[in-house]
Image (cartoon, rainbow, N blue to C red):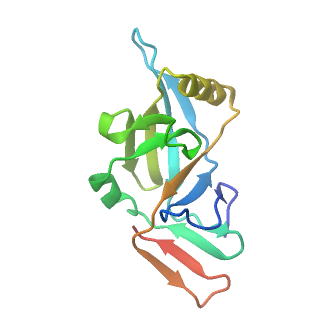
Amino acid sequence: MATPETKQMSDKPQSDGRETRAIGTKLEIRMDGGDDERRTAAGYAALFNNETDIGGWWTETIAPGAFAKSLRENDVVALHSHQSGRPLGRKSRDTLRLSEDAKGLGFENDLPDTNDGRDLAVQLERGDIEGMSFSFRATKQEWDDTVDPPKRTIIE
């Protein structure tokens, strides 16, 4: 069953094979104590076992553990609007922390003291932005073509 929490954003992969999905789970913003008043955005970038309609062409589910290998082996960058020139955090710099749990791929992102970081913090505090999107490359997947529409399970 499709839920309104996950929405399909991009019908076809980008030229480098990345696909984009959006998730509408509630994000939070919090202020860390201390002199710098660091703002941290947190929430889930992806939910496991959440069947999503991809434009009527197929349904899609992300399996638990799908991000484990990538989290061990790759650096991940949080970008504003998927634009490479607008970084908000980076795993290798510990300004973006990612972890899998039973629910999905959780994140904490220390927002930078930049126009994008300050604007995003205000938009989250006001509740104007309630979700986020993420890009990925599926390196292991299964398809069930016995159902209509076909069902894709992203394993890795």
* Residue 2 drawn above or below residue 106: below
Q: Position of residue 145 (x, y in %)?
A: 58, 88
Front position in the image: 123 or 63: 123
Q: Which quadrant would residue 20 be assigned to in this image?
A: bottom right
Q: Residue at x 43, y 56 (%)?
A: 102
Q: Is residue 22 left or right of residue 153?
A: right
* Residue 56 drawn above or below residue 123: below
Q: Residue at x 39, y 11 (%)?
A: 34
Which residue ends up furthest to the bottom in the rendered image?
Answer: 146
Q: Position of residue 90 (x, y in %)?
A: 38, 38
* Residue 122 drawn above or below residue 146: above
Q: Position of residue 149 (x, y in %)?
A: 67, 82
Q: Residue at x 51, y 35 (%)?
A: 86
Front position in the image: 17 or 24: 17
Q: Residue at x 67, y 69 (%)?
A: 53
Q: Which quadrant would residue 52 be assigned to in this image?
A: bottom right
Which residue ends up furthest to the top in the rendered image?
Answer: 35
Q: Which quadrant would residue 120 be assigned to in this image?
A: top right
Image quarter hosting the C terminus: bottom left
Front position in the image: 62 or 83: 83
Front position in the image: 101 or 131: 131
Q: Is residue 151 left or right of residue 103?
A: right
Q: Position of residue 16 (x, y in %)?
A: 48, 62
Image quarter hosting the N terminus: bottom right
